[in-house]
Amino acid sequence: MLIGLLNPVIRGWANYHRHCAAKATFNRVDHEIWRALWQWAKRRHLKKSRDWVKKHYFPALRNRAWTFATHMGQRTPDGKPIWLRLEHIK
């Protein structure tokens, strides 16, 4: 799964550079990751609309819009879906 492969790489890069990288650098890397994922999702579904791609791959989770995530197919006891999301660089 793509998210499972990317999360440790992003976490490792962020931990390695957390003492020397400026906020602007983290914002730029975060944006470039988002842009690459957006291009990948659009390329994967050429015949789907942009709205469909956004709804399918970038749901709003935890008060954060445009979170790259996937539904795990499982639900919490109260019926809410469980999502696996890409980590955000802080």
Image: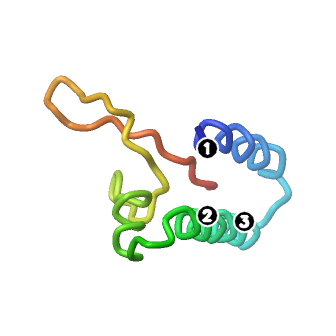
The residue to which callout 2 is attached is: 40
Residue lying at 50% horizontally and 71% vertically, measured from the top left = 46
Residue lying at 45% horizontally and 39% vertically, measured from the top left = 84
The residue to which callout 3 is attached is: 29
Q: Earlier in the sequence, mark 3 or mark 1?
A: 1
Residue lying at 39% horizontally and 34% vertically, measured from the top left = 72
Q: Mark 2 falls on what kind of element?
A: helix
Q: Residues within 10 Å of mark 3 (few under 14, many from 20)?
A: some
The residue to which callout 1 is attached is: 2
Task: Give the amino acid type for the residue marked by disc 1 in the picture.
Answer: Leu
In the rendered image of this protein, does residue 68 appear above or below residue 4? below
Indicate left or right for 42 with 73 as reference.
right
Q: State the quadrant of the N terminus.
A: top right
In the rendered image of this protein, does residue 28 appear above or below residue 62? below
Indicate left or right for 33 with 63 as reference.
right
Task: Give the amino acid type for the residue marked by disc 3 in the picture.
Answer: Val
CA–CA distance in space, label 2 to label 1: 11 Å
x, y percent for residue 63 = 33, 58
Q: Residues within 10 Å of mark 2 (few under 14, many from 20)?
A: few
Q: Nearer the viewer, residue 64 or 1?
A: 1
